[in-house]
Structures are given as C-alpha cells and as structure tokens.
Amino acid sequence: MQITVRILRFNPETDARPYFQAYSVECQPTDRVLDVLNRIKAQQDGSLTFRSSCEHGVCGSDAMMINGRNRLACKVLLQSLELNRPITLEPIRGLLVKRDLVVDMEPFFERYRSVKPYLINNEPPPTRERLQSPEDRARIDDTTKCILCAACTTSCPSFWANSQYLGPAALVNAHRFIFDNRDRAAEERLEILNQREGVWRCRTIFNCVAACPRNIKITQAIGDLKKKLMYEKM
C-alpha cells in the first residue's frame, strides 16, 4: 500500500524555521514507523535525520511524536494508525532540535544524573552479594524498567513550562534507588527531590503514563516519593 508521511524538518544551518515535508512511501501494514523512516532515508532523501540503535524498543533512542503522541518509532506498527490520513512525525517537545527528529538530550540526562541514579552503599563489602527478598525487589521492580527514552519527560506540561523541573524520568530513577533496601543514600536524594524544581512540580496530569513505552506506573511512583517526603521531611 501507499501511505503519506509528513515529517517536521529543520536544519539550523540552512532553515529559518521548521517546515513539514511530505513523502509517499510503499509499505506493508505490518511495517513499523521506523521501517518507513529507514526506507525514506535509503531510497528518497538521505538528508533526513533521526536516531535509532537497537530498533527493538530497548535503547529508547527513536522516541518521537507520532500523530501527536510521544512513542517509539520501532514499536509502532502502521496498522495501529489511521492510514486514511498522513502520518505526522515530529521531534519530542521541550528539548532543543538539533536537526529534523533529533533533539539535544543533554539537558534531560543532566537532570537524570542529578538524582544520583546509582547504588550508593559505603558499608564494608559483604562476603557475597547483597541479597534482596522477593518483596524488596517487587518494591522497585516497575521503576527499574526505564530505558531513558525521554518520552515521559517531554510529554509533561510542567516540563514544557519549566525546563528546570527534574521531570518524570529523573523521578522514576530516583524512586528506583530510594526504595532499594541495599542503598544508603535515600536521604540525599530526598533532599534533591524536595527542592523547588523537584517532585512537587508534578501536577499529576498522567501524560507521562500514556507516553511510557514500558508501561511504568510513573504517577504512582511520584506519589510514593511525595508520601515519603511528607512523612519523613515535614
């Protein structure tokens, strides 16, 4: 079948502003959006710029707006979209566009790094691994699934309004270690989250939950953080 794809193009070296460019592509209903992009780049326009790596929904590099929603291009099948109208592809919002569908991810990763997203335990090393019970692991199981695609953070109106807000992805990764019984830096992270641009900026809009390709219960995790702060800091 033949479909039309509208892609928001922008090259800061030559373009004064972004513009939509349409492509007509031969494809199958079982093709993914990423397959279509690869076909356009290989057969029609080598200048088209987008990110992809694993192409199987693990690396998160190909997050973009597909028909107005943040999704991973490698996970969306054409047959799941309305093919009686053009498919519209745009870069995720709230981050500087470097070219076409590629945005500058450094501000996103800066906020991620600020919550100390790694295990901190300065106690003497045990003679074997630090064990967790199934119950302890279950407490953090959902928030370990984040692939740092930024789909949640760049779908958040609070982040659009204030780029200094930590954002859902950073909060999810803070949750993962704050509630890890092997970690000893929960208090440090809670201090970071309790700042002006921290967890209280969340307005419980649920855009992040709808955007997450791993179906993480993001708003619930943020709620857990708010409760912990209320009980321990207030």
Image (tube, rainbow, N blue to C red):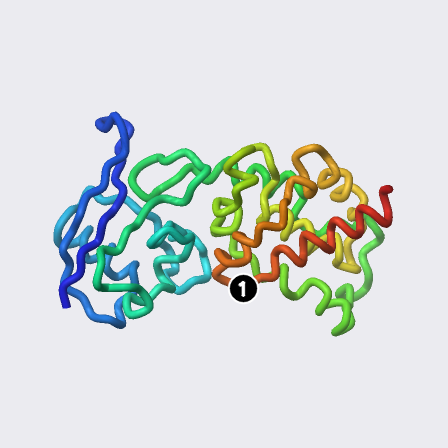
Label 1 element class = loop
Q: Residue at x 17, y 61 (%)?
A: 3
How many numbered badges does the structure rendering display?
1
Looking at the rendering, in which quadrant would you find the N terminus?
A: bottom left
Residue placed at 79% from the left, 60% from the top? Answer: 181
Residue 136: quarter of image:
bottom right
The amino acid type, in three-letter code, at marker 1 is Asn
Say left or right for 130 vs 155. right
Please give the name of the residue rendered at 14% of the width and 55% of the height, measured from the top-left corner: 24
Q: Position of residue 67 (x, y in %)?
A: 33, 54
Between residues 88 and 91, which one lies in front from this camera angle?
Answer: 88
Query: Which x, y percent locates residue 173?
Result: 63, 51
Examine the rendered structure and indicate whether residue 198 appears above or below residue 62. Answer: above
Which residue is drawn at the image coordinates 56% and 40% (left, top)?
A: 158
Q: Position of residue 138 (x, y in %)?
A: 71, 69
The quarter of the image holding the C terminus is top right
User: Horizontally, is 129 left or right of 74 in the view?
Assistant: right
Is residue 189 visible in this depiction of the protein?
yes
Name the foreground residue: 63 vs 87: 87
The x and y percentages for residue 82 are 28, 64
Identify the residue position indicated by label 1 in the image: 215
